[in-house]
Amino acid sequence: MNQSKKILLAHGGGGQLTAELIAEVILPAIGGQDASSLNDAATVAVGGGQVVFTTDSYVVQPLEFPGGDIGKLSVCGTINDLAVSGAKPVALSMALILEEGLEVSLLCRILTSAGQAAKDAGVTIVTGDTKVVERGKGQPGITINTAGVGVPLAGANLGFERVEEGDAVLLSGPLGQHGLAVMARRGGLGVAAARKGHYVSLQSDCAAIHGLTSAMIETLGSKVKWMRDPTRGGLAATLAELSAATGRNIEIRETDIPLDPTAHAVAEMLGLDLLNVANEGKLVAVIASDAAEKAVEILADHEIARSSAVIGTVGQSDDVPLVEMLTHAGGRRIVQTPYGQDLPRIC
Amino acid sequence: MNQSKKILLAHGGGGQLTAELIAEVILPAIGGQDASSLNDAATVAVGGGQVVFTTDSYVVQPLEFPGGDIGKLSVCGTINDLAVSGAKPVALSMALILEEGLEVSLLCRILTSAGQAAKDAGVTIVTGDTKVVERGKGQPGITINTAGVGVPLAGANLGFERVEEGDAVLLSGPLGQHGLAVMARRGGLGVAAARKGHYVSLQSDCAAIHGLTSAMIETLGSKVKWMRDPTRGGLAATLAELSAATGRNIEIRETDIPLDPTAHAVAEMLGLDLLNVANEGKLVAVIASDAAEKAVEILADHEIARSSAVIGTVGQSDDVPLVEMLTHAGGRRIVQTPYGQDLPRIC
């Protein structure tokens, strides 16, 4: 990436441009750090034990949306990063950047929601920070950073290197609800969708998924090989990362992907690909094939993962590994990494 | 605090209004959390061991200033929060919020500076996050959140409850260099000060102080009773916190406070009280009186703390405890908690 360039919104979209920014600018500049630096979560040796450590900043607009708000999102998102790393979330930090002029009542609603989400998840917010910045032009805002620490779950053994040909790819529920719900609330889309009768029930899936991940690891141990929550860039970006890092083809079947009719209709109407839309309460997991059925059973025991399904299979190694989808029509199409962003920021 | 109110810039100033916002809005809203929630750093039981965990967001403008930049500041600030908690800093997270239009070359300079500061401090940046937000009106910016994890130092035994009458109050160097250097670069002040020949040498004291804290604890153990880095709100806010939390009077002696002539001149010119100006490379410590001399010796062994001094004494318990200063003129004045902010944001 050329140093004379400027940062584009698309650099934050979670697709190829984000990956380039991190690999070509951020990691070399920080330098001298571990090569695995700036993963979603890192395992750190602290005082004789192992701690899993992660961070995420949340800049979503609007601050409140159907099914959630920036407070709940910031708690669930960081819990989920720990969860898919095979950790039990223990404690969170919460750093607030408040814009001058922000209504204290709105701040209260958002923090109450964050506190409730933490309580529901059995996680404590233990430390924080508060800054106030000059009022800008737009809607007075809140930016929240949550970092989290957790402990590795006994029996967790996750990693790209564990993924083999024939492994099953699981998805814990329908795609796109979070991204589309935020979009709907954000622009004219809410109105457009409402006209077709869809807007009313379009809700973010914002939820903590550590119950799903721990239940699977507890029962299936090392048969759970890799996990991720498909946030920015959606399922497409998640599978592209899996394919690139393992050097293996991935095949998914469109007919097996759980579908939310409302999200589907809204996405169709807008010409958006649900595979690219962000989620915040979903799990993608690679499971040994002989444990896949049991894994679906375990997931479907949870309210937030009733429609879990095996959606695909890990294929052979390849020089140019691809993610392909068998379509409803019986064709095949390549699932591409989103390049920049084709959606407003949703986290 | 009335819920119909709005957030003011002064709520972020580190003084009384910040304390009220945290105590009356943030903590009750988050609710159900530990009463000690949202301290600067928290000790968390993780996997059989103890981890010290902290977070801080940095929103300073300008991004680069004499003696440092937001990258170095974000690394040193979080290291310092761990250090004054009696911990050895181990790992940092770094979450970036970039404004659309930001020059990649500026981002590189800032991250290189952050990486160097981490390397110098023997701390690894292990995990991160990158978001991009729409360009606003002002200078394209960077917001950095760093969270940090560390391990409690053997022999560290710090707490307000350990502070007793007769204990010595130590300061590791002159006040106000960071806050005034940022101000000088920020507004017309730079020009004004330069006219008097002072601007050139006004540098932020931005530095990691974990070398100071660990050296003291290693040698003096539990004779080190309490530590803080006097950032937002300056020495005045730090001592006000100490006085309020211990219920004890504190007396400091103006003649014993180390002075940087340039910072002093700039502050005089502007009518600012150096006690209220922020620092980012200084240490305030309460030490048992029989170890105070040795503590000054230990601190002065370090380049960044050559002018360390005992500046005051912890007094009796009082219903309305006060911080008082014996002035150069031989009088006494009450050192008040800053109410809001009388300076631009400096972290």
Image (cartoon, coloured by chain):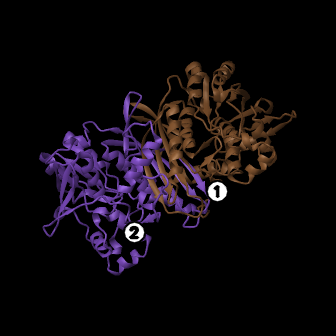
Chain colours: A brown, B purple
**For the N terminus of chain A, which image quadrant?**
bottom right
Packing grade of label 2 (10 A; few <14, some 14-19, many >=20) is many
The amino acid pointed to by label 2 is Met
Q: Quadrant of residue A259?
A: top right
In three-dimensional space, the C-alpha distance between marks 1 and 2, rounded to whole angstroms, equals: 30 Å
Q: Return the x and y of residue A229 as percentages of the image width and height.
A: 62, 36
Q: Is residue A181 above or below residue A325?
A: below
Labels 1 and 2 in the same subunit: no
Q: Quadrant of residue A206?
A: top right
Q: Residue furthest bottom?
A: B195
Numbered circle sitting on residue B183: 2
Q: Look at the numbered discs 1 and 2 and tell me whether their residues touch, using CB distance below 8 Å.
A: no
Total marks drawn?
2
Q: Return the x and y of residue B160 as percentages of the image width and height.
A: 25, 43
Residue drawn 37% across and 44% down? B39
Q: Nearer the viewer, residue B228 or B233?
A: B233
